[in-house]
Structure formats: structure tokens, C-alpha cells
Amino acid sequence: MSPRIPKRMAGCPVHGGLALPQVAARHTNDRRPPLFGINHPGRVNNLLAGRGCGGCGQPLSRRAGGKYTLLLRPADFTRGYSAEPALHPSDCARYAIEACPLLNGRMTSYRSTRRDLEAERCGQPDCDCRLWANSDDHEARAGASASPVYAAVFRQEDYRLRWGDVREHRDVLLGVALSGIEPLSIRLVTKGDPSVLDFTRALLMNLPLT
């Protein structure tokens, strides 16, 4: 049975009983299936810069005492930022953990065949899928064991962006900064099937593995 969709995500498209997060790639034509697990770069950047939730797309809390959640792999901690937008802790983050098979433990590895994003293009002139391109990250994850994932909760006052250089591009928006920020809490969401590298990263960052 699919988990209950939170009220905050009531406006999200639903496919196969699951609400599609705002970051997910999708076609303009709703009859074509969305790409769960594949993020839309434009939506990601807009949500990061606008302090929007990656689940529902609504603004994150800015009130005193407000919080946000990041779902993080060991590699995110060591590089010092999350490339994915933050989530509302009480509902959107909880729903993501319950709905995603890599987060709820139903899958311990990524799909064995790489998803060919260029082959997913629908050819409609008003659909930005014409810009979808395969990445080294997608290639590397195909068939790989799933990393441990942590839910880290932060104060809204600590939200800041991380910028950096990517190949020949300068001052690229990389994600939500982690370096130098103390989380309120860190919880292991799923153990995954950690590689030696992930295990080492977790040890270096003093992350729980159970």
C-alpha cells in the first residue's frame, strides 16, 4: 500500500499512487510517465535559490525556531553540501522516506540498467525534455549498492548555499551548504549496502551505521 500523501503535497501530480516531488523530471504531457529518482536541474536550482521544499515546492520555514531536513549520503557530508533541495521535516521528508524504495529499504541497489535520458525525450517542442542529457553520475550508479542515507535536521537560520566551479564553468550553484554547520539531529534512515568507501566516509564523519 502506498503511504498517505501529506496535505502539503496535495497539489503534486500523482503517478502509481505516489506523489511526484517537485524536483522530479517530468514531461509537459501528463500522459507520459514521470521520472521518479531523476531530478530536473532547472527545478532543483530554483528550489535551492528560493529556499523551496524539494517535495511540495512551497517555501521552507523562515520563522524563529523553524527547521529543514536534508537527506544525505556519506559522500554529501565529506564534500560539504547537498545537491538536492531541503524538505519540510514533519511531512515532506517523512513522505520521501516512506515512499522511496531506496530510502525505505525495499531496494538495496540502484537499477542495474542505466536510464537513458536522451531516449526519454518525447519530441514535443514545448517540453524541456529536449534538454535532458545523460550524466556520469547516472552511469556510475547503475547496479551499484545503495549508500546509507541520513536525515539531518538543521535550523532555518543556518540555511546557506554552496557555490563552486564545475569544469569550465565558474560560480555554479552546487547545493545547500553543510560545512561548518551543526545539525540539530542526524538519524540513519536506511543502512543500504555500504561500499568500503562509504563505510570509511561514515567513520571519518562520525556517522552512525546502525
Image (cartoon, rainbow, N blue to C red):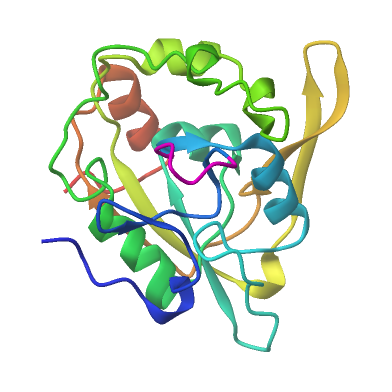
Give the vertical position of 176 relative to 195 (above or below). below
Residue shown at 66% from the left, 34% from the top: 127
Residue shown at 33% from the left, 26% from the top: 198
Residue shown at 16% from the left, 35% from the top: 107
Magenta stretch: dominant secondary structure? loop
Nearer the observer, 184 or 94: 94
Nearer the observer, 73 or 16: 16
Task: Based on the picture, tell me whether residue 143 belongs to the magenta stretch.
Answer: no
Nearer the observer, 204 or 140: 140
- Report x, y in % for residue 31: 43, 42
- Report x, y in % for residue 111: 25, 21
Q: Quadrant of the N terminus?
A: bottom left
Figure label count: 0
The magenta region covers 28-34
For residue 159, side relative to residue 71 (left or right): right
Task: Based on the picture, tell me whether residue 33 belongs to the magenta stretch.
Answer: yes
Quadrant of the rendered image containing residue 18:
bottom left
Quadrant of the rendered image containing residue 42:
top right
Nearer the observer, 88 or 58: 58
- Report x, y in % for residue 162: 74, 43
For residue 45, side relative to residue 189 (left or right): right
